[in-house]
Amino acid sequence: MTATHGTLTIGVDIGGTKVSAGVVDRHGRIASRTRRDTPHRSTAPSVVEDAIVSVIDELLAGPEGGGVGAVGIGAAGFVSADGSHVVFAPHLSWRDEPLRASLARRVDLPITVDNDANGALWAEHRFGAARSTSHAVMITLGTGIGGAVLVDGRLMRGRWGIAGEFGHMQVVPAGLRCECGNRGCWEQYSSGNALVREARSLVAARSPLATDLLARAGGDPANLSGPMITEAARAGDRTSTELLAEVGTWLGVGMANLAAALDPQVFVVGGGVSAAGDLLLDPAREAFARQLTGRGYRPQAEIVVATLGPEAGLIGAAALAESALAGSGPEGHPA
């Protein structure tokens, strides 16, 4: 399709398990959407690229396609400061991948590439839970942990574009091995993977504490998923509630460390695991209050759930593309 300067943008959110995309207007409203499963991380980068191009082509062929002026990509990985490369993606096969140039050869529209958590925070700042704040931290709990920082109303990317990779802070020396290559990373204790890993361990051991989960999984631990555990907790299953509380406690510990370094006004918690709501956030708030440096003598950041839910990433990617297209400042990378 020939490049235009429409009033709509496409946002593409690339996670560890799915590629979600939508056509988004300037008010953050999604006009149409689609998704694909993310190819396994052992596959070639071109296979992931094919999935991205597929969702873009589908949306451009739809009724809103003619009004699209740019495409924003939110990638689950380290994105270079100029937005040209995905330097490293723990859950995908990208290693110094020139994603923007690769997509530009196949999509005739301006392309913006940024970290997916940056996109999610920008969406929440523009349209959601962080709209009235100038200093915020986004924590996205999905396959792993993503993060982003807003300072004085601007995204903080760091010198090399890799700021906000909180999931790979070490919280347990010599702890569990992480896919990034290190041990004891925060996301090994507070993420969707951590939640499912612990639940599957109980079910595989045929623990009497896991009777409800075993039944929900049809007797096969491999069938367990994060949403299934959350559903069980909401139905009153004590073990599922405890598993979410453990993830939440680790979440609060990590946020207390971030508060010591960044002093935000609000923590916005998004990603798929955040669907558990207060089952996750109440233990996080309690742990945060216990661990906070200077507790009792300083303002305490609010901890809230992202209001845009799992769509924050694609809405934010689209909004960043809009900013870049308009040349409105450092919130978006030049295409």
Image (tube, helix red, strand yellow):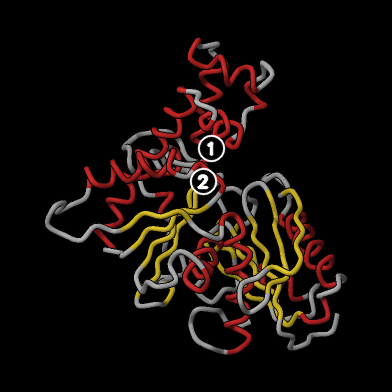
| 109 horizontally vs 316: left or right | right
Q: Which residue is mark 2?
A: 144
| Picture layout, residue 228 above or below residue 81 | above
Per the model, the C-alpha gap separating discs 2 and 1 is: 7 Å
Describe the element under mark 1 as helix, strand or loop. Answer: helix
**Amino acid at the residue labelled 1:** Asn
Describe the element under mark 2 as helix, strand or loop. Answer: loop
Q: Which residue is mark 1?
A: 193
- Which residue is located at x 35 percent, y 39 percent? 283
Image quadrant for the C terminus?
bottom right
**Amino acid at the residue labelled 2:** Gly
Asked if the residues shown at circle 2 and circle 1 are in contact, with their CB atoms under 8 angstroms apart, the answer is yes
| Picture layout, residue 144 above or below residue 333 | above
| 1 horizontally vs 168: left or right | right
Image quadrant for the N terminus?
bottom right
Q: Nearer the viewer, residue 181 or 259?
A: 259
- Which residue is located at x 72 percent, y 65 percent? 22
| Residue 33 x/y as whole percent | 75, 62
Estimate how packed mark 2 is, as few (under 14), some (14 to 19) or many (20 or more) residues with alpha carbons within 10 Å. Answer: many
| 75 horizontally vs 157: left or right | right
| Picture layout, residue 248 above or below residue 68 | above
| Residue 171 x/y as whole percent | 33, 42
- Which residue is located at x 40 percent, y 73 percent? 132
Estimate how packed mark 1 is, as few (under 14), some (14 to 19) or many (20 or more) residues with alpha carbons within 10 Å. Answer: many
Q: Nearer the viewer, residue 325 or 42?
A: 325
- First in sequence, mark 2 or 1: give its number: 2
| Residue 2 x/y as whole percent | 84, 84
